[in-house]
């Protein structure tokens, strides 16, 4: 998994002010479909919401990893937001979430989807890395920190 191919700097937002899980998923859907039509954005939002109904993607320690599949995309893509104030995300540890990394994969990407999720879970288990993300004050810094983690943890 190459973060540079998954995430575009235009799909990263730092210091976001949302007050609910629903609004965060709406924003992430917009970021994930920035090059698609409104119908695709709505479909992706519905997919993320449906996945959350199956069980929260709140990993714990303030991190959530919502994910879904999209018929309108050909390659995996991601969006990241760092919230100004943590929100309730029904995380496994009951702690509020302030780092949300959304993943969208093509409809047929079963194995790849699981590999990417596993790598992202590894990335967010790194508490020092999460602290660096929380310290970011701009979209550019947040994007740079994500790419830097990739370069330091390849192999």
Image (spheres, rainbow, N blue to C red):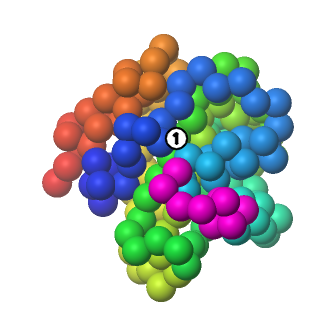
Determine which quarter of the picture holds residue 24.
Answer: top right
83, above or below 24, in the image: above
Quadrant, the C terminus: bottom left
- In the depicted view, which residue is nearer to us: 133 or 5? 5
Q: Is residue 43 magenta?
A: no
Determine which quarter of the picture holds residue 142.
Answer: top left
Q: Residue 81, percent across and down?
A: 57, 35
Seen at 45% across and 25% down, the residue is: 139
Seen at 26% across and 33% down, the residue is: 148
Seen at 48% across and 36% down, the residue is: 12
Quadrant, the N terminus: bottom left
Is disc 1 placed on a helix, strand or loop? strand
Residue that mark 1 sits on: 80
Judged left or right of residue 70, residue 9 is left
Seen at 39% across and 48% down, the residue is: 7
- State which region is magenta: 34-42
Judged left or right of residue 95, residue 62 is left
- In the depicted view, which residue is nearer to us: 59 or 150? 150
Judged left or right of residue 136, residue 97 is right
- In the depicted view, which residue is nearer to us: 29 or 3? 29
Q: How crowded is mark 1: few (under 14 residues within 10 Å), some or many (20 or more)?
A: many
Q: Residue 91, percent across and down?
A: 75, 46
Judged left or right of residue 80, residue 5 is left
112, above or below 131, in the image: below
In the picture as drawn, the residue positioned furthest to the front comes out as: 37
Residue 19 appears in view: yes
């Amino acid at each position: 998994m190459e973060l540079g191919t998954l995430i575009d700097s235009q799909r990263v937002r730092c210091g976001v002010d949302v007050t609910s899980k629903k609004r965060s998923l709406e924003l992430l859907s917009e970021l994930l479909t920035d090059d698609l039509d409104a119908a695709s954005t709505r479909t992706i939002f519905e997919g993320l919401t449906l996945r959350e109904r199956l069980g929260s993607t709140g990993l714990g320690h303030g991190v959530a990893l919502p994910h879904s599949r999209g018929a309108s995309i050909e390659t995996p893509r991601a969006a990241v937001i760092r919230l100004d104030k943590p929100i309730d995300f029904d995380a496994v540890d009951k702690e509020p979430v302030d780092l949300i990394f959304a993943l969208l994969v093509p409809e047929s990407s079963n194995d790849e989807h699981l590999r990417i999720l596993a790598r992202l879970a590894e990335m967010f288990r790194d508490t020092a890395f999460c602290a660096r993300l929380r310290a970011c004050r701009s979209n550019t810094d947040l994007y740079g920190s994500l790419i830097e983690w990739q370069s330091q943890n390849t192999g």
